[in-house]
Image (tube, rainbow, N blue to C red):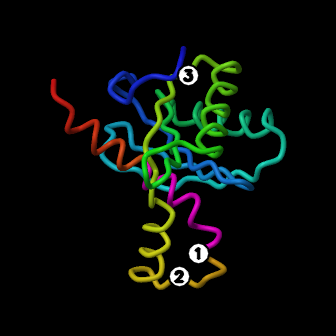
Amino acid sequence: MPVVDLADLPPQGALFGLDLGEKTIGVGVSDSTRLIASPLELIRKSKFTTEAERLFRLMDERRAAGVVIGLPVNMDGTEGPRCQSNRAFARNLIRLRDVPIAFWDERMSSMAVNRMLIDEADVTRARRAELVDKAAAAWILQGALDRLRNLPG
């Protein structure tokens, strides 16, 4: 299955959200009704196949219907090397498993999550570093879930 538009993800089942960083992959998951996204796990990057195997295990445990990957679009709307890297990650995942994947513009997600963790949760800098990628994955997924609920039809 190729990369799909957000509206073309399967209509039911949990979705996974991914925040792809240089050293880690933040993973978020929705409930089966797709109302709320929650941080799930932080996968340390090593070999792609190891990362994919862990992700697929998590998806199988929660019977995930699809994946939403954050796309770090530049503020002017253009796509740089990180967008290309995230698109390559999606293509490589699809080569290993026929899974529907959609992209979601993640501009400002890490900044927003950091601000929330500082202002609202009063989380220390060390703990924030551990939480930000997982929380950003949930933030990305929540944006996609909110958009899906507001699609016509």
Q: Residue 99: percent from the left, percent from the top?
A: 55, 22
Q: Residue 32: percent from the left, percent from the top?
A: 38, 37
Q: Compared to 3, does 40 lie above or below? A: below
Q: What's the mark number on residue 128?
A: 1
Which comes before the other along the chain, label 1 or label 3? 3
Q: CA distance from mark 1 to mark 3?
A: 31 Å
Q: What's the mark number on residue 99?
A: 3
Q: Secondary structure at mark 1?
A: helix
Asked if residue 130 lies in the magenta stretch, the reply is yes
Report which residue position mark 2 lands on: 123
The quadrant of the image that shows the N terminus is top right
Q: CA distance from mark 2 to mark 3?
A: 35 Å
Q: Are marks 1 and 3 in contact (CB under 8 Å)?
A: no
Q: Compared to 9, does 103 lie above or below? A: below
- Quadrant of residue 126 within the rendered picture: bottom right
Q: What's the mark number on residue 26?
A: none
Q: Are marks 1 and 2 in contact (CB under 8 Å)?
A: yes
Which comes before the other along the chain, label 1 or label 2? 2
Q: Residue furthest top?
A: 1
